[in-house]
Image (spheres, rainbow, N blue to C red):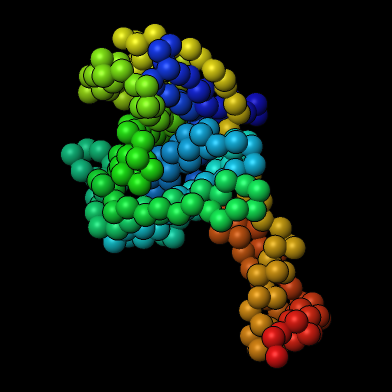
Amino acid sequence: MKNEDHYVRAISTAGGLRILVCSCAQLAREITALQGASLPVTVALGRGLAAGALMGGLLKAEQRVAMKFEGNGPLRKMIIEADGDGAVRGTVANPSAVVEPLDGGWNIPALLGRAGFLTVSRDMGHGGRPYLGTVQLHDSEIGADLAFYLTESEQIPSAVGVGVSLAADGTVDRCGGFLLQALPRADDAEITAVMKRLESLPPISTLLAEGGTELLLATIMEAVPYTRLESRAVFFRCGCSREKVERALHSLGPAELAEMRTGEGFAEVRCEFCRVAYRFEAAELQQLELLATATEPT
């Protein structure tokens, strides 16, 4: 199947507003299926993946962002990671979590929990230390939580909207969103016009179904002239590997590796993002144990 997932980046003609819009239904279908997500988790994770695609659109190719939503609801935790080249992945702590609907809709705040935190880590590349910021969850609807983080922690006035609709079979039909930011030269009239439009914005999934990202962008910016800058594909890529798992096992130290070898006789590590399992037999564990012993500080 051709991947039609993408984001579009644009800027107001006056240069004061930056906006990204995305459509990522295929990405959301693939990842929610890998996770074995319940219907409400499918919606929550889809929103998170759309937010990740938008955040990735703010990065350069060698940069990376990770978002961790933690709450006191049955979902417990959701992690979304995105690269500047369009790659996105995501996982949740409890994919089978369910909650009662609220007024006929998805009760994502009850699923994630109304008390909790959003932690964002930005790896800016070149081996530097990642930038880390944490805020309390704002309303646990995902989009507003990210907007609150960007406004409070990174001091960039922002608005974020993400939406997911499901098909009759429970899979993702539409998934996407927008990220709007006021830049230093922002004009108050432009901001007022766009924020007023957001107050009456139709559901994101409806706009995507009727006209894709171009209609979503045009609807949000209908009162403000803008220039379309670029469009880039969004796709699922995990990035896990046997070598990375070996390094993780090595870091456990010789004692724990020996316990694995003499106990179960093997170790199996399953990636929480792509669900691929990496199995290490006793002989491989012994080699890792010897290496860990040789490199252990004395």
Front residue of 114 and 187: 187
Front residue of 145 and 14: 14
Front residue of 182 and 149: 182
Residue 74 at x, y = what percent?
32, 60
Q: Quadrant of residue 149?
A: top left
Residue 93 at x, y = what percent?
44, 60
Q: Quadrant of residue 115?
A: bottom left
* Total numbered badges shown on the rendered structure: 0
Tell me: 124 left or right of 280: left
Quarter of the image for the C terminus: give it: bottom right
* Residue at 33% in and 56% down: 117
In this rendering, the answer to whether 122 lies above or below 157 is below
Tell me: 69 left or right of 259: left
* Residue at 40% in and 13% down: 14
In this rendering, the answer to whether 50 lies above or below 185 is below
* Residue at 47% in and 34% down: 54
| Residue 112 seen in the current view | no
Residue 34 at x, y = what percent?
55, 50
Residue situated furthest left in the rendering: 103
In this rendering, the answer to whether 109 lies above or below 226 is below
Quarter of the image for the N terminus: give it: top right
Residue 257 at x, y = what percent?
68, 83
| Residue 213 seen in the current view | yes
* Residue at 66% in and 89% down: 255
Front residue of 29 and 199: 199
